[in-house]
Amino acid sequence: MASQIDLFAAGAKRLQMTDSIELTIQSLQAYGPEHEHWGIAWSGGKDSTATLTLIMYLIDGGKLRRPKTLTVFYADTRLELPPLAIAARRIIDELEERGIEVEVVCAPLDKRFMVYLLGRGVPPPNNGTLRWCTGQIKISPMEEALRQRLDSIDGQILMITGVRQGESAMRDRRIEMSCGKDGAECGQGWYQQVLPNAKGLRNRLATLAPLLHWRVCHVWEWLKHWAPSAEFGDWSTAMIADAYGGDEAEEINARTGCIACPLASEDKALDTILRNPRWHYLRPLKSLKPLWRELREPQHRLRKPGLERLKDGSIAANPQRMGPLTFEARLMGLERVLSIQAAVNAGADREGMPRIDLINAEEEARIRELIRLETWPQGWDGDEPLATVPLDIVYQNGAVQPLLFGAET
């Protein structure tokens, strides 16, 4: 059993790189043998990539016994920052060369971000009332992939994640409350017998975060120097450091998400990448975030014309709310995204750099098909007025009040 070290109380002694790796080995040796089937949840970001490549090094070097089955679940949101997406493709090739099964987990075509937004007409997500993206393009597809995997095996899967203590204040608070759950000590990683919030998967999954105790500087050190060396596996991880600032990554310590995330107030991740001359050709991507803001404006959307009655007979709390994008707005958005993509790829060709596909041929065809079929989101039929049309709110008590222009969904 791994040594019982309370890392949260051991602030006086900072762990060195070799100490961190040793604790990770102890964590995996303590809990790994209890499970025949392992899965590694991999987003392509810094923490999950460090976790994945370290485990592969430990298995290849005989420091860790390979389980009966090992599956890497790569969460492909179709929105990853180009350096992360490019590195992921290379690492997938390296994994498959080692005989490791990689399952690329992507949302169904109609649920993908660009198709859902520009084809079905659901407006860009926001932090206030319409945060639909994360669950739809990342969490739900991963849960479905796990269900299918569980259907093909007997027993549990040990899902290994890249969660770390220092990743964000919100996560840290949750980890501090949970790190001792199911008898696990902090020094043994964060181990749980069930996967929280995974509907229908409880009692079939256990989770382990063997890099919980790693400092961010150890993550950078592993990705930039250790993992790319032949001794530790010759992995294509150095490019990932570019997405976090290259040589200045330790100072930035920022979490990178999707390209032009509509939920972020600033495009810090992309700005960091663009400071590297190698990635200057990606600058047209800066036009995406203003496009998402523009598409949320009333002139591009419909509005419910009166009181909206729900299925149970009650009245919706947000009368005359703004809703989906008009067909004209969807086509405008599609052409703008394709134009941005073309500008990036023209630069890529000039510089001899990898191309991108914000919208691939299959997605473009489906977007145009949904528009041609006059598709609207559930609860809308297209007969609603434009959101710029002045309307009065009529309440159940008969009171009438002018609608404030631009009331949001």
Image (tube, rainbow, N blue to C red):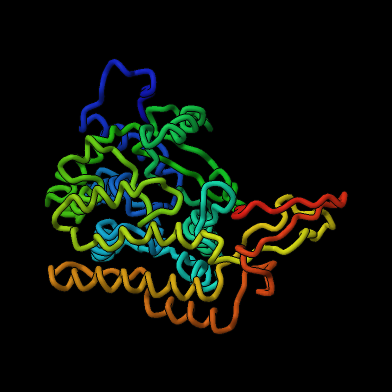
- Is 126 situated left or right of 23 in this image? right
Q: Quadrant of residue 353?
A: bottom left
Please tell me which residue lies in front, 273 or 48: 273
Identify the residue at horizontal 31%, vertical 46% (top origin).
Answer: 268
Q: Position of residue 365 (x, y in %)?
A: 45, 82
Quarter of the N terminus within the rendering: top left
Identify the residue at horizontal 54%, vertical 79% (top origin).
Answer: 370
Q: How many numbered marks are there?
A: 0
Identify the residue at horizontal 82%, vertical 54% (top origin).
Answer: 314
* Whether residue 153 is visible: no
Q: Position of residue 390 (x, y in %)?
A: 67, 61
Most extreme residue toward the right, as rendered?
397
- State whether residue 199 is above or below residue 90: above
Quarter of the C terminus within the rendering: bottom right
- Is 49 situated left or right of 289 in this image? left
Q: Position of residue 128 (x, y in %)?
A: 56, 47
